[in-house]
Every structure is written in structure tokens, then in C-alpha cells.
Amino acid sequence: MIQGGSVPDRPSASVISSRAVSTPVTGTFAYRVRPATPADAEAICRIYNQGIEDRVATLETELRTPDERRQWLTNRSPRYPVIVAVAEPASTSVRPPSEQASLTVPATVAWGSLNVFNAREAYRFVADFSVYVERAWRGKGVGRALLARLIELGREHGFHKLALSAFPTNAGGVALYERMGFRTVGIYREQGQLDGRWVDTIIMEKLL
């Protein structure tokens, strides 16, 4: 799982108008990225709570509820969209015959969002972002697909920069950010407390 940005549940930000994006096949499943809707609230809540429980991507410790996530979705500005990755069984033409009878219904396996970086007018061209991936889908390229789409959306919505904060221990996430063109600005030492211990955060940015 990766997560960029500081606090992904700020009360500002997206009912979405972005297009759906098809993505490559991952194993025996394909996935596509599309705008989130209130119907995705339960899945978004489940995936976000996994990120909170795993203590690898956020300083948040309070688990969310589907109703709270639904309100979070509906109260957002269109400039700050939320997107989801939906896994679907790959075409039977690329699946072994032994697996063709085990197709499952589509499932939301990850979500991402653009978030308000700072409410001051001077920062209106800067956004931070969040990306959370279901445990079983981490390391399969889903987070990269969401981040690529968020970068596109950042440009489409007129942002000049994307910024993020990440834990130094999230080596996979930091490596992905670097591959996607983000640079490290610095490190906040002992930026917050998590389970009674001080935690550093890395600050990164990408000009769009």
C-alpha cells in the first residue's frame, strides 16, 4: 500500500467527473480506474481502515465508518476528486481453462484522492493526495495506476504541484514516488505520535 499526502479525510474536496481508465491485466484479473461514487463508501472505508490498522501510511488511528466515508465523498468539491480501482476477472481468452469457471464479480480494491494542501488562497495551486490499496492487492501495480491517474487529474484541475508526506519506513511507496517524478524536499523529525512513539515523515513534491 502507498499513501501520499498528509490527512486524506480533510473536510474539503470531490464528487467526480473524471473518465474511467482501463489498466493492464494483473495475474488473472484486470482492473480499471474510475471516479468514486457514494456506493463505493463501504469499500473505501474498509481499505482505509486497513491502512490505519497496519500503521504504515498514516498517523490516523481512529477507524472510520461507511456512513462517515459516504459523507466525506458527497461533501467534496469537484476540484478534489476521489477515484477507485475496480478489479474484474480477465477475459477468458487470457485465462487458463481450469480457471475460467471461477470468475468473480467486480470488486473495489483501492482508492485515491486529491486533497486540499492548505486552505490559504496562496496555496490553491498545490494539492496533496492519498492512495490506499487493499492488503491482498499491494505490490501488483494498482497503486501506481491510481497515482498516475491522480497526476493526470492534478493537471486537468489546474494544479501546479502535488505534495506528499510519507513514513521513511514505507520504502516501497517512496521508491514509487521517485519513479513517478517526485523529489524529496526534506524530513520532518518527530512530526507526530503513533502508538506512543514519535514518527518522522518525508516530504516530497512534483511540479506538474
Image (spheres, rainbow, N blue to C red):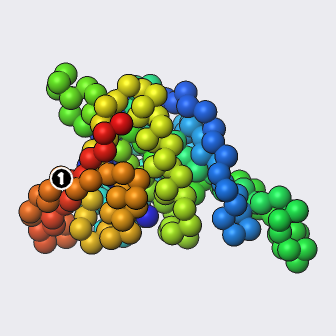
Q: Quadrant of the C terminus?
A: top left
From the top left corner, tell me how far across and down residue 147 is, in percent. Answer: 46, 49
Residue type, mark 1 in image: Val
Q: Residue at x 33, y 63 (%)?
A: 174
Residue in the foreground of this view, choosing between 135 and 170:
170
Vertical order, 173 against 115 (above or below): below
Read off the residue under disc 1.
185
Q: Residue at x 20, y 34 (%)?
A: 118
From the top left corner, tell me how far across and down residue 206 is, in percent. Answer: 31, 44
Residue sitting farthest toward the left: 189
Is residue 156 rendered to the left or right of residue 6?
right
Is residue 77 rendered to the left or right of residue 61?
right
From the top left corner, tell me how far across and down residue 162 is, in percent. Answer: 31, 41
Residue in the foreground of this view, choosing between 162 and 135:
162
Residue sitting farthest toward the top: 121
Is residue 139 rendered to the left or right of residue 2?
right
